[in-house]
Amino acid sequence: MAPGGSSGAPVPPAALIDTHVHFHDCFDLVEFLAAAATNLERRQEELGLAPAGDDAEPPAWVLLVMETDDRSLSSRLSD
């Protein structure tokens, strides 16, 4: 059962989270983020959540990146 707001209507999720993402040094950062956006957008549509441009606020997209032994995503983003 979806949580209800003060009106009793379902409350849409504030975020759509991919909870286990690996970023390896061999990945191109732009392609990696584009693929992640495509995956999250597809899942958002499958779940029937508000698409971008709809009157309802779409959920934020969040990636939880698991560090590896390669150079990390955070170091790539700071370059």
Image (cartoon, rainbow, N blue to C red):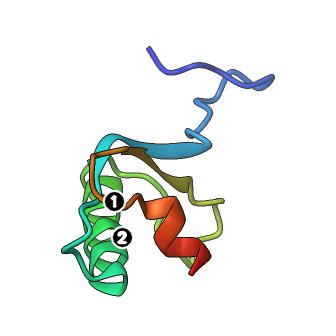
Amino acid type at mark 2:
Ala
For disc 1, the marked residue is 40
Q: Are there few (<14), some (14-19), or many (20+) residues within 10 Å of tag 2?
A: some
Q: Are there few (<14), some (14-19), or many (20+) residues within 10 Å of tag 1?
A: some
Can you say which quadrant of the picture contains the C terminus? bottom right
Q: Residue at x 56, y 53 (%)?
A: 59
* 55 left or right, relative to 47: right
Q: Residue at x 58, y 30 (%)?
A: 10
* 35 left or right, relative to 59: left
Image vertical order of residue 71 relative to residue 79, above or below:
above
Q: In the drawing, what numbered circle is on residue 52?
A: none
Q: Quadrant of residue 45?
A: bottom left
Query: SS class of the residue under badge 2?
Result: helix
Q: Residue at x 35, y 55 (%)?
A: 44
Query: SS class of the residue under badge 1?
Result: helix
Amino acid type at mark 1:
Leu
Q: Quadrant of residue 67?
A: top left
Give 40 or 6, whichever is nearer the viewer.
40
* 28 left or right, relative to 14: left
Q: Quadrant of residue 4?
A: top right
Q: CA distance from mark 1 to mark 2?
A: 5 Å
Give 66 or 54, whichever is nearer the viewer.
66
Residue at far right of view? 6
Give 33 or 5, whichever is nearer the viewer.
33
Please provide percent x and percent y for residue 70.
28, 57
Please provide percent x and percent y for residue 42.
25, 63
